[in-house]
Each structure stands twice: as structure tokens, then as C-alpha cells.
Image: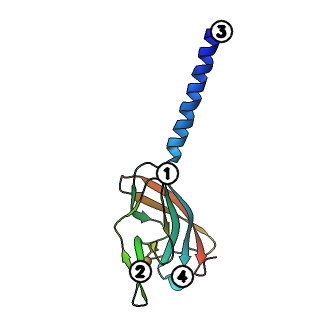
Amino acid sequence: MPFHCLTLRWYAAAAAFLLLSAGAQAAGPAVSGAWFRAMPAHLPAAGYFDLHNGSSKTISLVGASSPACGMLMLHMSSRSSGMEHMMEVARVDVPPGGTVGFAPGGYHLMCMQPTPMLRIGGHVPVTLQFADGTRLSAEFAVRRAAGH
Ligand SMILES: [Cu+2]
């Protein structure tokens, strides 16, 4: 009986360790609801998504790239005197366990020179770069300006 008990205990410890490992892998940055608003005539297209930080440290988004965009910038929209302005931002911080929404009127990605890959109804890959060197790839749906 002692041997049997020890064996069971070992299996329980191994199972707990495997669960912890799987949890650690999933606890990085995560992207959801990602899409580009395609504009006519290859005008710059804004990209929207939710960025979740599943880790216990603040993460900082510092850049993005996509083969569907000549250049992909981090932008912030703001309103002043009735006009919407956009400016480039160097980094967007997401607190531990938090989510930052990239949405119309606020943070967004800006696809400066859309290539023919950016087709309405399709998907394009985007790579997000973080300050700690982490990279995260995500698929962005491409929708017409109305958002569907
Ligand atoms: Cu913009």
C-alpha cells in the first residue's frame, strides 16, 4: 500500500505541474475582435481590436507590422474644436489582467499603404511587437467602412 500511495501522489504532482505549465503558456498578451476598416481607393485603413494582458506584469505594445500594409503605425484619435485628429503614439501599456480597446475614436493601428492583400471579406496577418521583445501574430478580418 505505501508504494501504491506514493505512485498516486507522484501522478497527482505531475498532473498539477502540467496544468501550471499550460496556464503559464496562455498567460501572455491576447488579441480578440480584430478587424481593419478598408477604405476606398487604398486610403489608409484603421485596425481595431482588444488587447488583453493575461500576465502579472504590465505589457507595452510598441509596434506592429503586416505584409498587407506598407507601414503599420500606432495611432490615437482625439477630438478638439469639432475636428478629429490622429497622432502617432510610441507605446500603449496594458496593466496586468487588463484589456485595452483599440476602437473608433481612440487607439487604433493605421495601415498607411494598404496592399491588394487588404481585401474586403478576407483576413490579413498582423504581428504585434512588445517592449520586452515578445511578438504576437493575429489575424485581422477586413471589413468595409460600415464595419461589416
Ligand atoms: Cu490613424
State the mark number for residue 54: 1
Q: Give the alpha-carbon distance from disc 2 to disc 4, as whole Å.
A: 20 Å
Residues packed near mark 4 inside 10 Å, few (<14), some (14 to 19) or many (20 plus): some
The amino acid type, in three-letter code, at marker 4 is Met
Of residues 117 and 5, the one drawn nearer to the viewer in this rendering: 5
Question: Looking at the picture, which amino acid does disc 1 mark?
Answer: Gly
| Screen quadrant of the N terminus | top right
Label 3 element class: loop
The front one of 16 and 128 is 16
Residue with the mark numbered 4: 39
State how far apart marks 4 and 1 are (Cα): 33 Å
Residue 49, placed above or below residue 82:
above
Task: Choose top left, top right, bottom left or bottom right for residue 5.
Answer: top right
C-alpha span from label 1 to label 3: 42 Å
What residue appears at the point 57 percent right and 36 percent down from the top-left corner?
Answer: 19
Using the numbered discs, state the Cα–Cα distance from disc 4 to disc 3 in whole angstroms: 72 Å
User: Considering the numbered disc 1 on the image, is that residue within a helix, a strand or a loop?
Assistant: loop
Kind of element beneath mark 2: strand
Going from N to C along the chain, the mark reached first, 4 or 1, is: 4
Q: Nearer the viewer, mark 4 or mark 1?
A: 1
Kind of residue sitting beneath label 2 = Ser
Which disc number belongs to residue 1?
Answer: 3
Q: Is residue 69 above or below residue 145?
A: above
- The three-letter amino acid code for the residue at tag 3 is Met
**What residue is drawn where x is 50% and y is 67%?**
101
> Could you tell me residue 115's position as x and y percent?
50, 74
First of labels 1, 2 by sequence position: 1
> To which residue does mark 2 refer?
78
